[in-house]
Amino acid sequence: MAATRIADLLKSGQPGDSTTIQGWVRTKRAQKTLCFINVNDGSCMSGVQIVAESDMAGYDNVISQIATGASVEIQGTVVESPAKGQRIEVKAEQIRVFGGADESYPLQKKRHSFEFLRTLGHLRSRTNTLGAVFRVRNAAAQAVHEFFRDRGFLWVHTPILTASDCEGAGEMFTVTSLNLNQPPLTKGNGVDVEQDFFGKSAYLTVSGQLEAEIMAMAFTNVYTFGPTFRAENSNTSRHLAEFWMIEPEMAFCDLMGNADLAEDFLKYIFKAVLDACEDDMAFFNQRIDDSVLATADNIINNEFARITYTEAVELLLKTDKKFEFPVEWGIDLQSEHERYLAEDLFKKPVIVTDYPAAIKAFYMRLNDDQKTVAAMDVLAPKVGEIIGGSQREERLDILETRIDEAGLPRDAYWWYLDLRRYGTVPHAGFGLGFERLVQFMTGMGNIRDVIPFPRTPDNIEF
Amino acid sequence: MAATRIADLLKSGQPGDSTTIQGWVRTKRAQKTLCFINVNDGSCMSGVQIVAESDMAGYDNVISQIATGASVEIQGTVVESPAKGQRIEVKAEQIRVFGGADESYPLQKKRHSFEFLRTLGHLRSRTNTLGAVFRVRNAAAQAVHEFFRDRGFLWVHTPILTASDCEGAGEMFTVTSLNLNQPPLTKGNGVDVEQDFFGKSAYLTVSGQLEAEIMAMAFTNVYTFGPTFRAENSNTSRHLAEFWMIEPEMAFCDLMGNADLAEDFLKYIFKAVLDACEDDMAFFNQRIDDSVLATADNIINNEFARITYTEAVELLLKTDKKFEFPVEWGIDLQSEHERYLAEDLFKKPVIVTDYPAAIKAFYMRLNDDQKTVAAMDVLAPKVGEIIGGSQREERLDILETRIDEAGLPRDAYWWYLDLRRYGTVPHAGFGLGFERLVQFMTGMGNIRDVIPFPRTPDNIEF
């Protein structure tokens, strides 16, 4: 059943070509002796227009079965299109209907809210907007692999299941194979986790970073790209309980090398998506957020600004702009501060480095001033923080002290500390949430609309 | 700190080139006025030989700090190597030791069992064998994306968390955010799952297939590549509780199209790995399993045999070979039967199709004979089943009957059935476990040695 992808046909089809097209009917417009059918196979935004004339064999029967949502195969000939905005169309010689769709098909021509479409997770990818989102998502995901592969990075699969409940990045889900209604109990009447699948409590990972560090200490440059989890009860347009994260980790790399990679990475992904999904990106700019193309252009064509946290605080104190959260050295920058820096002041992405140690994770490398760490956040216009990373503490004694100060148990980190005992090296890495990146690229307002099957509090359908 | 990857240096370095190398010391051999140091950065199997002479500045001090496991940076000049088996080596002009490694470093020169190395999950990637495994794993994973991307398939991220406990492929882990020691209770004293994170019971997925079908009904050709889970208490060399699976799904595709894709896929991945990891594959052939290269050659250069299940049973009944499990029409083929077909009889991969409906999943398409389904298994010499797939049942009434016959609740499949109500099409797909594929390629005996951080019963370290 070899058919031509509609994206390929629209690009390279020539009048006179014989072609076979397969897809789903988006619209049908029947006239007396003529029927126009728009067919889409998901390969691109615009479907192809099929023209069926009443002298086609079985015309009446076939046309009666065709409705929005029906699946069809068309054999025909490519012809020049007299219609505006399309180079070619297909004159049907034979139409086969695989499956109909009656009036109950929920995606009739009228527009639907994204909220309503979320209740149709099994059908919403057939709409223009969600179709475009998932093509962009795929193009960005492929570009992630290309970017790292071309630079000699190994894709490493860090574990989803972990026994460590002190990764520190957020609330964790518990994973168990026990019967929760009749769990085995210890003498003290607690659940006997020794009888659980792993012989101890198990959780879903919040980050692959610590294990990625293991792999970087063997392969120099590695990255993860996989699902991570948060059990936080955050019902917002920016939070998911399950999302995909990208985390490169580089041995023999310092904070500036890390910042260089982050900048190259963002430029590469935006450029790759613009190249691969030109029509989809134009659609987002027209229908969803008219700054999407300008933002991409801003990312690709500007050298990112680089300032320290201390400089950032000085700049924030200097401005006349009023902030809800008052600024002083030591605070965690709020979204309003981050957006002021990137959007109003620099008008381009800004990499802020060297944050106060007190507000950052224990594994970030302590600077010589003893009060800041070699952390970095990449702030982008419109969204604020898009990437967070750091040089890691590679000195055993300082790392041990930092673990103690954070109130964490050294024992749990025995292998992480071993990496500093045996051939330790300066190393660095960053993380970014893939869905936030897709949201940023497409301008989609709710993160639930950039992942095929969103998981949020009280929501696990499909 | 821009250094040259050792893989690149060994390939293209020319005598006279200045170079900087970073990596970890594998071996050190000190003579009176000379020291040979083998340095490895994980980019390839063989490290580069560094020659330091005693007239180098700080020679004594530096050499005293260098031991197996230490991390170093060497600036020097590429010279022709007088040693056998290496084209070039590096004459050191300056050596910097980042981190030492004392006698307690567990990976001293002597060989270690893979079982012992599993207790060193944070260090074992620095050994020759595990290093080779994870380079092959990366090359295979990259090839998976290339294969599908080049054919216009979208990579779709199907959910890890699912509310459906009836996917049918195996035992599932439960995921919860409740405090297991003090869970909220219903009036009947059961755990009140309505108060859990998702408002109902949640599990870790065993397959992304059903959701991949959703996406194929919008984008025609899609694939998943992500982690899946089994809570089965299987302590074998072939089972993991967490493993990565690849599942393509194609609309407008029948069983033979599915078989074609599976065959093309395996040939492509093997070829890509042989191209990318020539030295690593030669190592496996020499040290782990001397049939590894012949097997790869067999996969790449033979047209796979295709027979029906019924023909397979006839062939098994005809042979004089004695089987432990007796053969008759209706049985599930055992590993001994599968290996006989692929290894002894056809001496190449065999695709067996059209299995008895009674032993296959409800979603496989019922054949016209009413007793077999359009299933396929790809059997390979040495391992037996490596891929399993089917054409899916696209006819609503038959699918409903099959769900009833399997004793499953129709309600749970409302959206899966909707796909057959609205624009249903013939479609097909297959699944393969990525770790089994890597095991097959490398000849590694235990599946725990082809994933960085294996999860098995009572084992969740690192």
Image (cartoon, coloured by chain):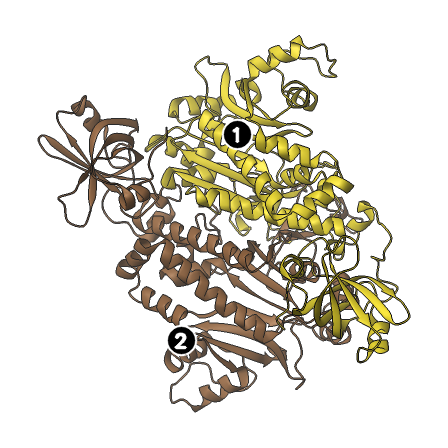
Chain colours: A yellow, B brown
Q: Position of residue B95 (x, y in %)?
A: 24, 27
Q: CA distance from mark 1 to mark 2?
A: 49 Å
> Visible in this render: residue A189?
no
Identity of the residue furthest to the right in this view: A32
> Visible in this render: residue A99?
yes
Q: Is residue B317 above or below residue A280?
A: below
Q: Quadrant of residue B90?
A: top left
> Can you identify the residue that label 1 sits on?
A389
Judge by depth and name the residue closer to the eye, A126 or B30: A126
Q: Quadrant of residue A24?
A: bottom right
Graded by Cα atoms within 10 Å as few (under 14), some (14 to 19) or many (20 or more), the crowding at tag 2 reads: many
Q: Is residue B451 above or below residue B312?
A: above
User: Would you say B151 lies left or right of B125 here?
Assistant: right
User: Would you say B320 lies left or right of A239 here?
Assistant: left
Q: Chain of mark 2?
A: B
Q: Is residue A103 above or below residue A329?
A: below
> Can you identify the residue that label 2 sits on?
B348
Mark 2, secondary structure of its residue? loop
Residue located at (29% from left, 46% from top): B11
Q: Position of residue B398 (x, y in %)?
A: 74, 76
Q: How many marks?
A: 2
Quadrant for the N terminus of chain A, please. Answer: bottom right
Amino acid at pointer 1: Gly
Q: Chain of mark 1?
A: A
Quadrant for the C terminus of chain A, please. Answer: bottom right
Judge by depth and name the residue closer to the eye, A290 or B371: A290
Q: Position of residue A408 (x, y in %)?
A: 51, 28
User: Would you say A380 lies left or right of B63 here?
Assistant: right
